[in-house]
Image: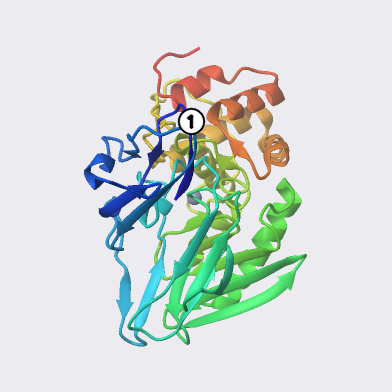
Amino acid sequence: MHFTSNDRPLLFDLRQRVLSASIDGHPVEPSTLVPGPSGMREIGVPLDQGDHELLLQYELSMPGCADAVPLGWTLQRPGIVFDFWMSDLHPGRYLEMWVPAPLCDDQFDLTLDIEVAGGGPHQVFANGLVEPGPTGGHRVTYPSHFTSLSPMLVMVPVERYDQISTHEDGITLDTFKLAGPEIDLAACHVTVAECLAHNRGRFGDYAHGDRFLTYVWGSTRGMEYDGATTASVGSLEHEVFHAWFGRGVKPASASDGWIDEAFTTWYTSSAPHRRQWAQPFDWSEPPLVLRPPSPLARYTPREAYGAGARFFAGVASVLGVDGLCDVMASLYRQRRGGFLSTDDLESHLSGAADRDFGPEFSRWVHGRAGST
Ligand SMILES: [Zn+2]
């Protein structure tokens, strides 16, 4: 891992057990890199300002974080079925499960050389460039604007997946699933294409180059990546929407991830839940923390989905449903490929409505008691 030292603490996360470490070729005792209370590790060694190299050795095993899954060895065709299995819901669930990573607003180059020993050939699906590895296997190079929540990686033994690929409106759509689960892959592929076209028309240009990659799986959950998703059939619309809000415009810190889930749920939720609705703010509703105050908290509260969508319904009661969509579209176009903080959102909405949403953000985003 290459990094630049300045006068700020040098923090990174890795949810694997470090066996040995060195900085610029000098051995470092791994115990000096143990995680602090937040789960972040600090490079506490005095370093000159400038560029340095941290080398870590560890055996890839079950990540030490909530709801992780181990490397999945399959015997049907010997090899692994592997997915990064990221999540916004718990700290340490982005790239740092497997690879050392900084906070989710840091952009960095990432190259992975991957080899599977003891199995047959594998297919690598990734939202980066996949090439033959230098000593066999695969090399995956992700774009330098990616952050720790961007990279998608799925590995499966060859001949154990089904794939549909088409080229539509300048985007190559690759949709695949494992052989086995009863999933209508063709219908899923059409859903992805329709959602991409709809979002582009409503909110603005696609932000992730010329490809969208979808892994449809039997799990009930879904996860968004830059121009890619791992999704259940039922979550496809939600996850494709995140290519605009969540990964087209990324959270400025992990604490700002509530915005993506709240607005995505408000826009895409399906029966029995309401979608794209307006409901005046109700000051008898209790305060709520959607944005955890600590920059190192690094989780999205589960309330971001339901109560967060209800918050946007309150904004829509002021701006109108179409008005809110227009305002979010202008926000997206201003920041496409960049980041969005909670304060940025509050000032953008307030400016568009010519009305201060500060009291509402204070009560139902920051969880502070008090009312107008
Ligand atoms: Zn989501």
Amino acid type, residue under disc 1 in the picture: Asn
Q: Quadrant of residue 72?
A: bottom left
Residue 296 locus on image (x, y percent)? 38, 34
In terms of depth relative to the viewer, which is nearer, 154 or 318?
A: 154
In terms of depth relative to the viewer, which is nearer, 292 or 221?
A: 292
Q: How is the image coloured?
A: rainbow
Q: Quadrant of residue 42?
A: top left
Residue 282 locus on image (x, y percent)? 48, 24
Within 10 Å of disc 1 (Cα), the crowding (few <14, some 14-19, many 20+) is few
Q: Is residue 10 left or right of residue 321?
A: left
Query: Quick check: 340 above or below 145?
Result: above
Q: Residue at x 29, y 56 (%)?
A: 63
Q: Residue at x 40, y 34 (%)?
A: 47
Query: Quick check: 23 above or below 223?
Result: above
Q: Which residue is mark 1?
A: 6
Q: Is residue 295 left or right of residue 277?
A: left
Residue 80 locus on image (x, y percent)? 36, 76
Q: Residue furthest left?
A: 31
In terms of depth relative to the viewer, which is nearer, 303 or 10?
A: 10
Q: Is residue 113 visible?
A: yes
In terms of depth relative to the viewer, which is nearer, 117 or 164?
A: 117
Residue 120 locus on image (x, y percent)? 40, 86
SS at badge 1: loop
Q: Is residue 231 visible?
A: no
